[in-house]
């Protein structure tokens, strides 16, 4: 897996926790089993900051065109997402053409899913001030400013500033999960 602190490295940062009445620990076990059985993981999520065909797919395609992989890095947090654990039955790359969710894959209570290679548990810290938004109207904006209030995820590039910023500002402690994004990168669910 590429280093997340390599200039120009693309990452999708996401806060994760309780989701659809399931603890993050239970989700991790289920997702690792999913990879063993199906060879792919669909990591469910919601919100428009990582909309599949206007944010994630263009961002990852641009990175891959330049010979880079994109990593999903996840920060465990306390969450109150208690949506019904309804299983997705179909997915779509474009929101128009639908196909059945692959056998062995379970996505619960989500509008979208990141498509992942495998999931690794890795503990490290990052400074969001070393990243900038890599796609969309906020492209170039510092990630620490972007991840405020209601925003809990984004498509970022590692671009440390020329003048170092004090490390105590916007350090995210304990990034706990990392995975490679794979084609088709992100999908719609129903």
Image (cartoon, rainbow, N blue to C red):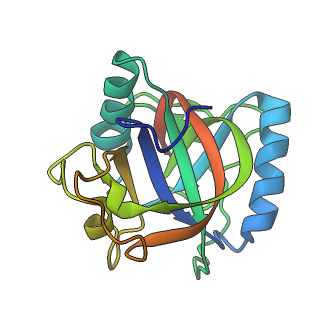
**Quarter residue 129 falls in:** bottom left
**Quarter residue 130 falls in:** bottom left
Which of 100/57 is in front? 57
Residue 7: x and y in percent read 37, 37
Q: Residue furthest left?
A: 137
Which of 79/190 is in front? 79
Above or below 67: residue 117: below
Residue 78: x and y in percent read 61, 81
Residue 190 in view here: no
Residue at left offset 39%, top offset 62%: 128
**Quarter residue 68 falls in:** top left
Residue 179 in view here: yes
**Quadrant of the snapshot with the N terminus:** top right
Q: Answer with left or right where residue 117 lies relative to residue 51.
A: right
Residue at left offset 59%, top offset 82%: 80
Above or below 156: residue 38: above
Residue at left offset 35%, top offset 35%: 8
Please tell me how many numbered marks the rendered image carries: 0
Which of 12/183 is in front? 12
Residue 36: x and y in percent read 85, 33
């Amino acid at each position: 897996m590429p280093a997340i602190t390599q200039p120009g490295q693309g990452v999708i940062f996401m806060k994760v926790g309780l989701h659809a009445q399931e603890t993050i620990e239970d989700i991790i076990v289920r997702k690792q089993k999913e990879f063993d059985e199906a060879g792919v993981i669909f990591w469910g999520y919601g919100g428009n900051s990582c909309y599949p065909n206007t944010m994630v797919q263009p961002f990852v395609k641009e990175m891959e065109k330049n010979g880079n992989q994109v990593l999903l890095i996840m920060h465990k947090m306390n969450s109150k997402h208690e949506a019904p654990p309804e299983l997705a039955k179909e997915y779509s790359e474009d929101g128009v053409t639908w196909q059945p969710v692959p056998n062995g894959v379970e996505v619960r209570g989500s509008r979208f899913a990141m498509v992942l290679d495998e999931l690794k548990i890795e503990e490290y810290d990052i400074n969001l001030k070393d990243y900038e938004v890599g796609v969309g109207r906020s492209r170039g904006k510092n990630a620490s400013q972007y991840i405020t209030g209601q925003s809990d995820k984004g498509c970022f590039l590692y671009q440390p500033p020329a003048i170092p910023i004090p490390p105590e500002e916007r350090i995210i402690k304990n990034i706990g999960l990392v995975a490679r994004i794979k084609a088709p990168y992100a999908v719609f669910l129903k």
